[in-house]
């Protein structure tokens, strides 16, 4: 995707005209852009320079590195190998890739079984463990992309890989989410196209990171899959709801919550412990944080109680999520010191190896209310 197409997507996701985007940049940075200049960017007639890339990143809620990446274009293998540190590990990755190409690699059904295992393990393992293992799988599957179903496998692996990078950094996570969406398109599988985008949207919206990208991916999922209730659509709706709440658009967030609960009635999961599932308890984890961000303490507490009633005991990390939501509620209500203390106690009670990047970002959100 060109930088111009990305600017247009981000602008459209905010429901802004080209003139409105120019005005937002002018008001924030004292520039003198007009609608025609935005049009020239979007049509790739002109490429924004470093200053205007910073302006666009600021007003469109997107990490600067994401815009820079579209100007400098990276390759798949460079990112996969570059995500690891030790040269011997990079050597092993390259060897695995060529071995897979020469030997044919796992069959499609074997890949689907691997995905199911990773979906379960993601719920309990730390980000570093998942990242090491999935980087190996990505290099292997890269050598097998002769079949559309393997593009679907690759897209879901990329989405999981993206989750191992902090959304606050943005550049790595968003780069992989966008690559996952492109890979899903290659699969020609509408379910995969919706799921990948929806999973990325809820990850970014829940973390409160790269909200412009969360909106773009959610809108794409809604456009592709709006006629069919699905877990991908459910994730997309709640990703967009969290982005709206964080921007202060409470009515849109509540409307999306209502829509999401309606979708859940048709598409909710019976599977309880997979990242590919959204059972009742997980829906209420989404809603607990959403309602806390909206200042709806009664609704948030009800969602927390509903989540705890069915949360599997082997997933203590998600119980910690709920405790951090309570800490956020305390901080937002005015007891900032108490909110931070409550949230930190919950983090301290969870073994460090169970901590996730998302939990650390939630802790930061509570602390920011403390500092405000």
Image (cartoon, helix red, strand yellow):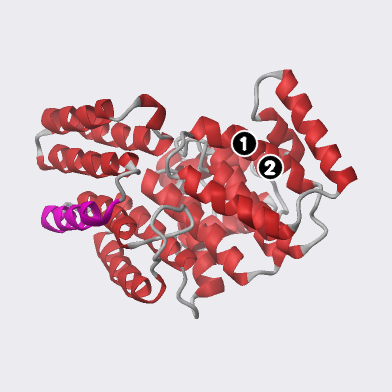
Seen in the picture, residue 70 relative to 107 is either above or below; the reply is above
Residue 324, percent from left and from top = 24, 39
Q: Residue furthest bottom?
A: 227
- Residue drawn 69% across the image and 37% down it: 136
Q: Is residue 307 magenta?
A: yes
Quadrant for residue 132, please give it: top right
Q: Which segment is the magenta one?
A: 296-311
Position of 53 compared to 58: left or right? Answer: right
Q: Nearer the viewer, residue 245 or 139?
A: 139
Residues packed near mark 1 inside 10 Å, few (<14), some (14 to 19) or many (20 plus): few
Rendered view: 9 above or below 316: below
| Residue 367 in sight | yes
Q: Is residue 86 left or right of residue 324?
A: right
Are circles 1 and 2 on residues that touch, CB within 8 Å? Answer: yes
Image coords of residue 238 (percent x, y): 37, 60
- Location of residue 349 (image quadrant): top left
Name the residue located 51 percent from the left edge and 50 percent from the top edge: 119
As helix, strand or loop, the secondary structure at mark 1 comes to helix
Residue 133: numbered disc: 1
Residue at the spot x=29%, y=57% of the render? 281
Please give the label number shown on residue 137.
2
Mark 1 → mark 2, Cα distance in angstroms? 7 Å
């Amino acid at each position: 995707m060109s930088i111009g197409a990305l600017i247009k997507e981000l602008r459209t996701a905010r429901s802004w005209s080209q003139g409105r985007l120019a005005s937002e940049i002018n008001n924030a940075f004292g520039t003198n852009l007009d609608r025609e200049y935005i049009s020239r960017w979007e049509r790739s007639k002109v490429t924004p320079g470093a200053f205007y890339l910073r302006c666009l990143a600021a007003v469109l809620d997107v990490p600067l590195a994401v815009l820079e990446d579209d100007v400098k274009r990276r390759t798949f293998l460079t990112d996969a190998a570059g995500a690891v540190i030790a040269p011997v590990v990079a050597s092993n990755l390259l060897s695995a890739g060529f071995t897979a190409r020469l030997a044919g690699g796992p069959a499609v059904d074997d890949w689907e079984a691997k995905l199911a295992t990773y979906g379960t393990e993601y719920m309990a393992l730390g980000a570093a463990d998942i990242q090491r293992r999935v980087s190996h799988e990505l290099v292997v599957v890269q050598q097998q992309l002769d079949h559309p179903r393997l593009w679907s496998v690759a897209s879901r692996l990329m989405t999981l890989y993206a989750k191992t990078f902090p959304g606050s950094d943005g550049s790595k996570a968003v780069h992989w989410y966008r690559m996952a969406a492109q890979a899903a398109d290659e699969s020609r599988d509408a379910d995969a196209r919706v799921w990948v985008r929806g999973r990325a949207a809820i990850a970014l919206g829940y973390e409160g990171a790269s909200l412009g990208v969360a909106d773009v991916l959610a809108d794409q999922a809604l456009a592709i899959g709006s006629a069919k209730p699905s877990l991908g659509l459910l994730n997309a709706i709640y990703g967009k709801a969290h982005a709206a709440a964080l921007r202060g658009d409470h009515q849109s967030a509540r409307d999306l919550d209502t829509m999401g609960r309606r979708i859940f009635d048709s598409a909710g999961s019976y599977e309880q412990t997979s990242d590919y599932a959204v059972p009742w308890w997980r829906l209420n984890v989404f809603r607990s944080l959403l309602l806390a961000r909206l200042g709806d303490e009664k609704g948030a507490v009800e969602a927390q109680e509903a989540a705890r009633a069915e949360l599997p005991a082997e997933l203590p990390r998600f119980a910690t999520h709920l405790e951090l939501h309570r800490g956020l509620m305390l901080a937002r209500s005015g007891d900032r010191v108490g909110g931070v203390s409550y949230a930190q106690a919950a983090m301290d009670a969870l073994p460090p190896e169970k901590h996730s990047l998302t939990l650390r970002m939630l802790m930061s959100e509570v602390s920011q209310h403390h500092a405000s």
